[in-house]
């Protein structure tokens, strides 16, 4: 079974609008971490935001926020006030405490911001 | 501004040749990961080091791939012999055990 599922291959958003990128995860661990990375066309992987499974508050980093719904096993990324530079691939990832400590990545969502 | 560095950034080689990719993790980070990204498979883990010790290389084809960390400032990924199906972007990432991982810029490998 996939550990991370991103069901939106592509999304479009108007500049200055907010957009939500979906992510669901599958784990039997009680302790885990959820991450979002951005990959622009240049190819680099840029860390955006982190949510720990025991964190009661949703994580926020500037225009990024993570809508964490533990019972639903979802960790959606919300980007507010979209900018043209937000156009990129976005990957959701999870790290389980047990195991190798590596990140399991979803297949990504390509976001296009329309002027 | 500490960053993970990788060399080379691009590599084109012929099938059967040896390829060595190098990574310098961020100073002070005690975990190093090698990931491979392809269109078909997405991002997949190849190898993982903690405090320079290899902990997991189950994602790596053992017959042709090898990963080492000769010192705290250098991690290497070697492919010998290379095959066209090895064409991909290879990322190195470093971090602390409980924190986020920081990725290098990647090495884009093309095997003809």
Image (tube, rainbow, N blue to C red):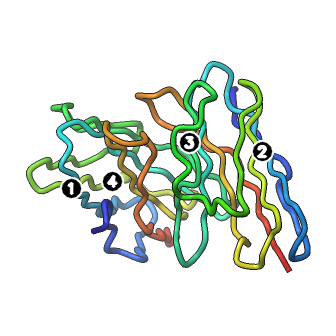
Q: Nearer the viewer, mark 4 or mark 3?
A: 3
Asked if residue A40 is positioned above or below residue B75 in the image, the reply reads: below
Residue B21 placed where, x, y %? 80, 50
Q: Which mark is residue A74?
A: 1
User: Is residue A20 at all visible to an observer of this figure?
Assistant: no
| Marks 2,4: beta carbons within 8 A | no
- In this rendering, the label closer to the viewer, 1 or 4: 1
Image position, residue B90 (x, y; %) = 69, 57
Element on which disc 3 rests:
strand
Quarter of the image where the C terminus of chain B is located: bottom right
Task: Name the element at disc 2.
Answer: strand
Check if mark 1 and mark 2 are on a common chain: no
| Mark 3 and mark 2: Cα distance apart in space | 16 Å
Above or below for B33 versus B38: above
Compared with residue A86, is residue B24 higher up or lower down, i.e. above or below?
Answer: above
Say which residue label 4 marks. A77
């Amino acid at each position: 079974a996939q550990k991370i599922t991103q069901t939106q291959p592509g999304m479009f958003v108007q500049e200055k609008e907010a957009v939500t990128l979906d992510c669901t995860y599958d784990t039997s661990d009680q302790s885990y971490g959820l991450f979002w990375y951005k990959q622009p066309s240049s190819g680099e992987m840029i860390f955006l935001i982190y949510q720990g499974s025991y964190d009661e508050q949703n994580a926020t980093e500037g225009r990024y926020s993570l809508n964490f719904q533990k019972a639903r096993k979802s960790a959606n990324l919300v980007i507010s006030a979209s900018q043209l530079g937000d156009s990129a691939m976005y990957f959701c990832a999870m790290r389980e405490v047990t195991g190798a400590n590596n990140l399991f990545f979803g297949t990504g969502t390509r976001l296009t911001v329309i002027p | 501004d500490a960053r993970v560095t990788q060399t080379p950034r691009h590599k084109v080689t012929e099938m059967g040749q040896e390829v060595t990719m190098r990574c310098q993790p961020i100073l002070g980070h005690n975990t190093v990961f090698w990931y491979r990204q392809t269109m078909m498979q997405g991002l997949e883990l190849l190898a993982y080091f903690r405090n320079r010790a290899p902990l997991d290389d189950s994602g790596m084809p053992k017959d042709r791939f090898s990963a080492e960390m000769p010192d705290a400032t250098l991690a290497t990924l070697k492919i010998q012999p290379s095959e066209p199906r090895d064409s991909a972007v290879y990322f190195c990432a470093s971090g602390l055990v409980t924190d986020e991982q920081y990725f290098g810029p990647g090495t884009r490998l093309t095997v003809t």
